[in-house]
Image: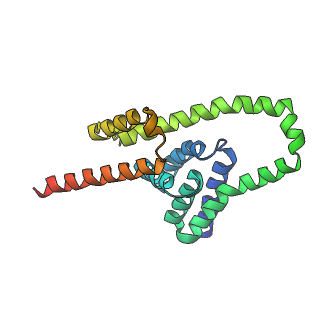
């Protein structure tokens, strides 16, 4: 990868870090846009990235930035993408720390955050909808292919999480169950092909 590409990688993740207000889930719309803008990863691969990033230690956005950067430019790319994502936060936190007392009591700042929250919620909801189209309905190249097994499994997990005793189970357990279920489905599909 040449220097211009590294600069582009840093700049794209810098913008994500600057405008993704609300933590990891708020980065999802930007990653969706990134998949459309560049040929770094597909929307289907994005769903796998989310699953892996949620299953591994660390913040969602940083894990995904590191993955994309590594995929595009190896270890230096992973470092550059991660630094691009984190750098705006470092700058903003440093500025806020210097003026925290003034910012925390300013009614204009509070009013701005009051307006930002619903906007961030809507943007995240749209991204989640887009990801659900790929994972639950296999929406690829403008065509829907309902994946009944995925829909059924999602419904079962959702219903189980409504039961009080299942709510106490650590999320890692659900990731493991999902991974085992997906692996089992993959083996079944391979077995059908062999037969």
Depth check: give the residue in front, 117 or 38: 117
Task: List x then y, in percent, for residue 51.
Answer: 45, 51
- Horizontal placement of 16 versus 74: left or right? right
- Horizontal placement of 175 versus 194: left or right? right
Task: List x then y, in percent, for residue 9.
Answer: 60, 59
Q: Quadrant of residue 193?
A: bottom left
Depth check: give the residue in front, 10 or 28: 28
Determine the residue positioned at 61% across, 66% down.
Answer: 79
Using the rendered image of the protein, determine whether residue 177 is visible from the camera's viewpoint: yes
Using the rendered image of the protein, determine whether residue 145 is visible from the camera's viewpoint: no
| Residue farthest along the left direction in this orientation | 195
Way the structure is coloured: rainbow
Task: List x then y, in percent, for residue 179.
Answer: 36, 53
- How many marks overall? 0
- Horizontal placement of 16 versus 157: left or right? right
Depth check: give the residue in front, 71 or 181: 181
Task: List x then y, in percent, for residue 112.
Answer: 76, 32
Q: Which quarter of the figure is the C terminus placed in?
A: bottom left
Determine the residue positioned at 52% across, 60% down.
Answer: 67
Task: Name above or below for residue 128 compared with residue 49.
Answer: above
Determine the residue positioned at 51% across, 45% down.
Answer: 32
Q: Quadrant of residue 149?
A: top left
- Horizontal placement of 183 versus 96: left or right? left
Q: Which quarter of the figure is the N terminus placed in?
A: bottom right
Determine the residue positioned at 71% across, 29% down.
Answer: 115
Depth check: give the residue in front, 34 or 108: 108
């Amino acid at each position: 990868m040449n220097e211009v590409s590294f600069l582009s990688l840093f700049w794209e993740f810098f913008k994500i870090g600057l405008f993704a207000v609300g933590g990891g889930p708020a980065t999802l719309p930007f990653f969706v846009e990134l998949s459309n803008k560049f040929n770094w990863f597909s929307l289907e691969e994005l769903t796998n990235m989310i699953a892996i990033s949620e299953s591994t230690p660390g913040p969602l956005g940083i894990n995904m930035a590191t993955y994309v950067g590594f995929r595009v430019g190896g270890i230096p790319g992973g470092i550059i993408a991660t630094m691009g994502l984190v750098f705006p936060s470092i700058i903003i936190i440093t500025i806020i720390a210097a003026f925290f007392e003034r910012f925390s009591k300013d009614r204009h700042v509070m009013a701005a955050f009051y307006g930002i929250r619903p906007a961030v919620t809507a943007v995240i909801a749209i991204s989640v909808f887009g990801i659900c189209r790929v994972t639950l309905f296999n929406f690829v190249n403008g065509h829907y292919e309902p994946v009944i097994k995925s829909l059924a499994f999602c419904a079962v997990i959702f219903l189980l999480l409504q039961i009080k005793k299942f709510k106490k189970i650590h999320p890692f357990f659900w990731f493991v169950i999902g991974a085992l279920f997906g692996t089992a489905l993959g083996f079944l599909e391979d077995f059908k092909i062999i037969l």
